[in-house]
Image (spheres, helix red, strand yellow):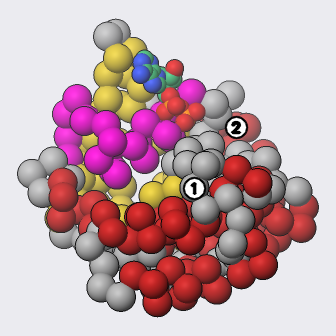
Amino acid sequence: MSISVKNLSKHYDQQKAVDSISFEAHPGRILGFLGPNGAGKSTTMRMLTGYLMPTSGNAEVSNQNIISQPIEAKKHIGYLPENTPLYTEMYVKEFLRFVGETYKLNNIANRVNEVIKLVGLTPEQHKKIGMLSKGYRQRVGLAQAIIHNPDVLILDEPTSGLDPNQLVDIRALIKELGKNKTVIISTHIMQEVEAICDDIIIINKGKIVANDSLKGIKKAYHQDSLEEIFRKLTA
Ligand code: ADP
């Protein structure tokens, strides 16, 4: 298994932003991480990717412990943070080369060209990041997340703010990447979950309130509308 989370918590003073959650995510499957605003999704993702120290609990990514082997764990993870912070003054290729260098990749120029093709950035590859549309910036974010060919992808609202065409393209790309990686994606869009996710976790006020396959959760609640199930569990 690629991600194994055990009793992971993050407390801010009295608030339990993430409250002892445990779950697993598996290769070749896309896990939708759902919850209302403030439920603890980004906090969980930031802990898994080593940007935030848990208050307690632990997790393994590709058998590397995120607390005792953070550098090894990071090598296995591609992360697209919410509101992808990118260096807007850098050129697309310059930025991707820079990210490749931080991973000490061999043959960086080739790999940069490969990921540019893979995420559909070819027409915009010579531009500055600041000049790109939101959809193309998101592709740069995805390109930097996959450049080191990680086996785990953690994508925090990867389609927020995209127009309908861009949305379809990025979803297709995530679905393709999910064929041989473990993917966790947070989103508010139930259609998106229906379109690309195999498994679902619903988190509310820092706690997991559902953990099932997309089919399984509908069966368990005798309900075909994920939206209805979501409302019921997070009301
Ligand atoms: P989500 O991604 O599900 O919208 P977050 O993980 O961003 O939720 O936030 C979970 C809760 O933790 C929220 O109530 C948020 O206000 C709180 N929180 C997040 N970061 C901090 C912080 N640095 N200091 C205090 N509270 C925080």
Instruction: Say which residue appears at 31% left-offset and 37% top-offset.
Output: 52
Instruction: Say which residue appears at 25% left-offset and 36% top-offset.
Output: 53
In this view, the residue in front, 74 or 18, is 74
As drawn, is 47 to the left or to the right of 219?
left
* Location of residue 87 with respect to 30 vertically, above or below: above
Q: Which residue is denoted by mark 1 in the rendering? A: 90
Amino acid residing under circle 1: Met
Residue 71, picture quadrant: bottom left
Position of residue 129 measured from the top left corner of the image (x, y, whole percent): 66, 56
Split into 4 quadrants, where in the image is the C terminus? top right
Please state which of the two labelled residues, at mark 2 or mark 1, is closer to the viewer.
1
Amino acid residing under circle 2: Lys
Does dot 1 land on a helix, a strand or a loop? loop
- Whether residue 219 is visible, yes or no, is no
Split into 4 quadrants, where in the image is the N terminus? bottom left
Q: Which residue is denoted by mark 2 in the rendering? A: 232
As drawn, is 96 to the left or to the right of 187?
left
Position of residue 10 measured from the top left corner of the image (x, y, whole percent): 32, 29
> Is residue 175 on the magenta stretch?
no
- The magenta stretch spans which residues? 38-58
* Location of residue 141 with respect to 149 vertically, above or below: above
Q: Which mark is residue 32?
A: none
> Distance from label 2 to label 1 (Cα)?
45 Å
